[in-house]
Image (cartoon, coloured by chain):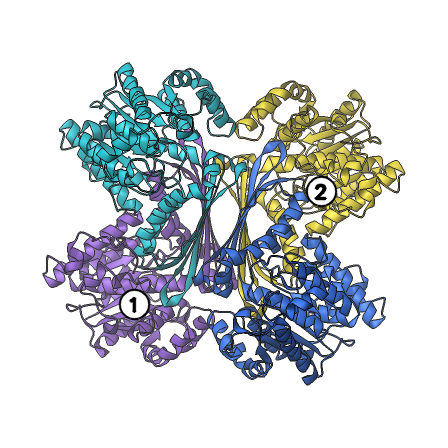
Chain colours: A blue, B yellow, C purple, D cyan
């Protein structure tokens, strides 16, 4: 339950608003508001975050961009058939889905567009501003949930804002990939930007320059929901115990739209790079680490990761750890998106700007942080939220729950 | 490499000195001294512990008790055939094994003994004192590595030292199990005591009273080397991510002497209790958690654990994590025994007494600590060692490595 | 699709007709008749069995006994919520469920009954005869799907039919467990009996005597749907390749009513015995084979088995195979029950009597067969069905599909 | 123990005679002769094959080609350090290794050779003939164990023997890959040829023409020792039970020379094709089947395969099977090479020619057979060996062991 000093009505604008993760975010928020489900997987609903002044569920208003136009209730039905949204929940949120649907606008894609990217950006900005005004929101957090894009070659215009904007105005050029144009529009509209995908998004220097100029916070990238989550939990154990990891092989099987996209080696490159960076940061680069993502359509939204770790112990003994993680991708991702919307909103309210490194807890490839160890990320997040709380409420002592030093959200038994 | 302010020559007295773990400890220490192997798995050889004033490898002198009399070089050959000690190492330590062998004395077991337990204790104490004097040691750390005993029913004499000593003197009674008689003798001889097994050992109130009386530190119990290590690493992840664990089932297959002992339900009870306590502390008691230990003789010293975790996520989605851990029990345990000898020795040198809760990092069922989360245990250990360093060296600033706040031994890439 | 020479309208009488497996059998049959689902998992729908004169789906009429009275449509809704029956199917079979419901009668249980077991048997017989006449059925196959019972101590009356019937008449005695009383009633009513559970059922000599007397066929026991299926597939591979299996450990996790029953060691004893027999028959008795069944309520109808096989190869190399099987127990069992009803019905029509060893394909602990190797069972089943076909149709050459020597149903790609 | 009607002294000529598999074959044969090990993994040592007139262990004489010149005893020491050859065995076979070493000649590789391939073939043929005469052998079976080659584009000369021989004589051309030149030389020397690798070898039409011309038997290809063995055991189970396999994903981790070769995508192509063919033959082509081979050097000769099978059951329920197979590649392969040498030798003695389809039991991609189901291959092998026995001994009734119908080598408990 959040909270007397709430940061007030907040918009959550989803890029890719009709995708599986976004539909799960929307369905879940509606279900939470209606009391139909427990907030399982929502970090901000439990100690120590529950005393922070974050927007309450009914203070979050959702809109978004997408380039497909299947109605949200249709998408939710598909997810229900796939086992993601219980039938009983579906009935209780039908009306809410139609309301959100009316706030989804057509997004940008180069194959659908004519004219300059600057013109396209103006449309996107207009959608955001109009949404904010229409609902009387203090702020709107833009979260990218669209399909992963392939890596983009850097060009000179990506380095400098002025040069970039000149290129955007040229109707013969497509200087930014969709994720980056979305980030540009968000920043121009005064909105914090969060990238839950490994796409280029806000990572270009010119866009970071724009965020600084506008004093806006941003976060990313690539939500950490499965194999990489486990790797950042397990790798520090080997280091702490002075065991020598020799190889760490991984295979990911997934279906759905994500599987189709990532089954294409060009598109998977972004994701594989993002995954590999974490392991190298944790264990060094002399660990053999083959990694695969396979498109297995029949698995739908279920993703399965198998990892095989070979390590050396005392007197050279060779040992292994294997794990298999099987989960619903959207169910793992959606509550984190709600958490990110709340936390980024509070950061904006508290005047934070630049990359929010303390949100590394949520990401495979964190912007503004070199910390990949999950336990440390957990601890840093707790401290950062406590600072935010003090900034926003002026209450340095905190509420009882946070005064005991159990600032670490891993503490104690699960709710 | 340790260290200018070393705490000086230290004895390491092993109860069960001819067992697999002890033989691996002894073989490994000899191989480390001879530079034949790297100190993989030895936590105290790496940052931030490597700047602490711990006894160097060649300052550790080993002796011990056992009730079997197979020569150590014979035992080491058996371990070599089982793949635990490389043949090349074996050749280099043969002489060293014979030297240690000459410091092993016959241990206590009720089926082998006549007379009162007090008399038996006198013999054990005499062995310890004589060993300490013979080698000119400043201190001797006693570590219990003997076979796991079944749980012992508490009697009134276990609550009070005076009553206990009266019962010990009665030749018709066997009031203490061997592990507790060994702990009694250690304390009476002025030696710190570490229990690497789940046996009763020092946990009886009367023995804790004796430790307090003598101002001695002690630590335990039950070395955390496999399934429980992983559980204390993984369970906090579920809590931190607000995922609801519904069941956590485990099966352990192991052979060797340990397998034979733990395959007996009566003896396994101690181990199962010790394992279960950690999970309940981490996740609460409403998690279904069946747990088995099976004796599979053909696996020898290899132990394999399979765990299956069923958890619930957003919108009630049901997901699973499975892991299989396959390792050499003795290879995992032995370097921790060396670490414990060094750290307990330093604690003794620094005047610490009572249960060393900061050593929870090493144990399934830590004495003096309620902390089961491995990352927190890692952090607490680092702080405690830093305090020890200051106590022993008077150097509050520490060496470069420890000044940066990277007191956490999980930091950075592996060596 | 079956078949011009069909054996005609057949009753399928389920003991435990409101349980999960039975409800899945009933829902599935109704869905198959309505063309709502494909006959996946139904062996008798594919070559070489599809040319045999078996009752068609709309020639099977279902009734049964149960001691609980939850309506079938309610039970089917519960299974739907658990993911076993698709919501779309549920809508299409609602009326059919109510019709079957009207043919379910109250079963026997000693705690619910007064009077002698002979009187109870008369009631059961009456239910069967009345069902057969009401629907004009040529024959009724009784299949036991009730909860597993604990093993029963053998008494003298179990050895001899006359003595048994005398004991049944004694109102102070409970000489038969429910499964065996059900078998007795089935045989007395002239019905073939199939035991899909490991309960005592028809295995008592006195009941086998009765089956012989009545010239009735019977089959069992304990449907082979998961771990044991895999064991009987994999163990012959080790034998064929002359690899020496040293240990084969297994753990089964399951929830639902089955989990609750089998979580009780007394009840699990029947199942564990039945499972162990197969492995010993395949590999000999010197293989270490610890086996567990754990009740994990949150898993519901999902069952997960983990097996770990340790084997020795050339030059003594030690190697392992692990597998994890995760399935819906009722979904695996139900189509086999339909297959057994069809095949046993045809055997009865063809005048077969005694234990149907050729149905070993379906069972963990086959009656009338020592063959546990799955591939051999598959081949024997095919030959037996071909013989049945000839008996019933007089057509020795077979239809095109069976003339080619591809009598083996493993042949060719899957449908 | 084989056998009074033995086919007499037989040569086993290994291409790649200093590789890991070959060294294990040689070490193992020497150890078997010396009675140092049991014949675990040798199919021909057990019923029903043990009554066939195959060459006894001391009737097999080994020689071979290789392009490296590390001495065999050195190679055996390396395998011993890797855990493949016990130290005790190593001591007992040292002299034998030196004797075999003296029969290894330099093999062919285009990068090492000048002159035409015809000249190179002459040298190879000379080596074979001289080996046969030197040892007074009745026949020599050539087995290819060299590193896997990449697939070779077919050219016109591969279709026709005359054209091929013309091309071989042209010093400017390299028309055959090494494996095929080795096959050519074997056939020209009158030797049966077996390919244990997926290289091109004898599969070219021109070489098959030569085998027919010379009336020689041949067999292949690609020894079935791990993942594919399990697939051909498990896939028929799904078919027999009418379960619908939707996807079958696989990952293979291996080190050693094999890992290094197969880690190269070009070289892996041969292996991946060979593996994929079997699954498609068993389950049809609509099964999603991503497959990877990763080079993980630290694993050495140990190979680990993980497979994940997703299948559909009754009422559309989605279920999974996963397995992990961990074994020593050379230990799995070597006994099969000895079996193949014995069986091919007997086939030659009995006048068989052309592809030996009945040896499909041993191969991933069997020549002369479309049968991939392991149980059927087992049965066919048994029948074929029984026919061979009759051909060679004239004894139609067989010895006691084979008269009982237990011709199936899966029968009964393991030795």
Q: Secondary structure at mark 1?
A: helix
| Marks 1/2: CA–CA distance | 64 Å
Instruction: Kindly indicate the quadrant of the structure image that contains residue B261.
Output: top right
**Closer mark to the observer between disc 1 and disc 2:** 2
Residue B220: mark in rendering: 2
C136 to D168, vertically: above or below: below
- The number of discs equals 2
Q: In x, y percent, where is residue A404?
A: 80, 61
Would residue B142 be found to the left or right of residue D356 on screen? right
Q: In x, y percent, where is residue A334?
A: 60, 68
One can see residue D35 in this view: no
* Mark 2 belongs to chain: B
Would residue A169 be found to the left or right of residue B403 on screen? left
Neighbor class of circle 1 (other Cα within 10 Å; few <14, some 14-19, many 20+) is: many
**Residue found 28% across the figure and 33% down from its top:** D167
Q: Quadrant of the C terminus of chain C?
A: bottom left
In depth, the one of D71 and A241 nearer the eye is D71
* Mark 1 belongs to chain: C
Answer whether labels 1 and 2 touch (C-beta < 8 Å): no
The residue pinned by badge 1 equals C118
Neighbor class of circle 2 (other Cα within 10 Å; few <14, some 14-19, many 20+) is: many
Q: Quadrant of the N terminus of chain C?
A: bottom left
One can see residue B7 in this view: yes
Q: Secondary structure at mark 2?
A: strand
Q: In x, y percent, where is residue D115?
A: 35, 25
B274 to A141, vertically: above or below: above
Would residue C62 be found to the left or right of residue B28 on screen? left
B185 to A220, vertically: above or below: above
Residue B380: mark in rendering: none
Circles 1 and 2 on the same subunit = no
Instruction: Kindly indicate the quadrant of the structure image that contains residue C181.
Output: bottom left
């Amino acid at each position: 339950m959040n909270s007397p000093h709430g940061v007030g009505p907040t918009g959550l604008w989803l890029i890719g608003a009709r995708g599986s993760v976004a539909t799960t975010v929307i369905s879940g928020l509606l279900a939470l508001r209606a009391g139909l489900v427990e907030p399982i997987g929502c970090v901000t609903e439990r100690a120590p975050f529950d005393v922070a002044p974050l927007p309450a569920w009914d203070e979050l208003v959702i809109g978004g961009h997408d380039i497909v136009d299947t109605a949200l209730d249709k998408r939710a039905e598909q997810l229900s058939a796939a086992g993601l949204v219980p039938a009983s929940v579906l009935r209780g949120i039908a009306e809410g889905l139609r309301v959100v649907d009316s706030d989804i606008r057509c997004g940008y894609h180069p194959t659908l567009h004519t004219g300059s990217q600057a013109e396209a950006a103006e449309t996107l900005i207009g959608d955001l501003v109009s949404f904010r005004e229409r609902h009387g929101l203090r702020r709107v957090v833009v979260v990218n949930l669209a399909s992963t894009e392939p890596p983009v070659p850097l060009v000179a215009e990506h380095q400098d804002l002025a040069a970039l904007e000149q290129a955007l105005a040229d109707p013969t050029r497509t200087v930014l990939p969709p994720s980056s144009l979305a980030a540009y529009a968000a920043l121009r509209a005064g909105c914090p930007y969060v990238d839950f995908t490994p796409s280029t998004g806000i990572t270009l220097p010119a866009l970071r320059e724009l965020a600084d100029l506008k004093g806006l916070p941003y976060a990313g990238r690539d939500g950490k929901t499965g194999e990489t989550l486990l790797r950042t939990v397990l790798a520090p154990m080997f280091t702490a115990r002075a065991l020598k990891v020799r190889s760490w092989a991984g295979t990911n099987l997934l279906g759905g739209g994500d599987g189709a996209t990532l089954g294409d080696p060009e598109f998977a490159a972004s994701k594989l790079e993002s995954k590999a960076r974490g392991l190298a940061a944790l264990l060094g680069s002399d660990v053999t680490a083959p990694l695969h993502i396979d498109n297995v359509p029949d698995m739908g939204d279920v993703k399965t990761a198998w990892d095989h770790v070979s390590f050396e112990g005392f007197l050279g003994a060779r040992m292994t750890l294997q794990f298999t993680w099987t989960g619903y991708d959207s169910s793992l991702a959606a509550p984190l998106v709600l958490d990110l919307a709340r936390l980024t909103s509070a950061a904006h309210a508290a005047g934070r700007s630049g990359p929010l490194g303390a949100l590394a807890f949520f990401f495979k490839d964190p912007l503004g942080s070199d910390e990949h160890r999950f336990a440390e990320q957990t601890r840093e997040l707790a401290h950062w939220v406590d600072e935010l709380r003090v900034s926003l409420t002026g209450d340095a002592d905190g509420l009882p729950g946070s005064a005991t030093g159990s600032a670490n959200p891993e503490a104690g038994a699960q709710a």
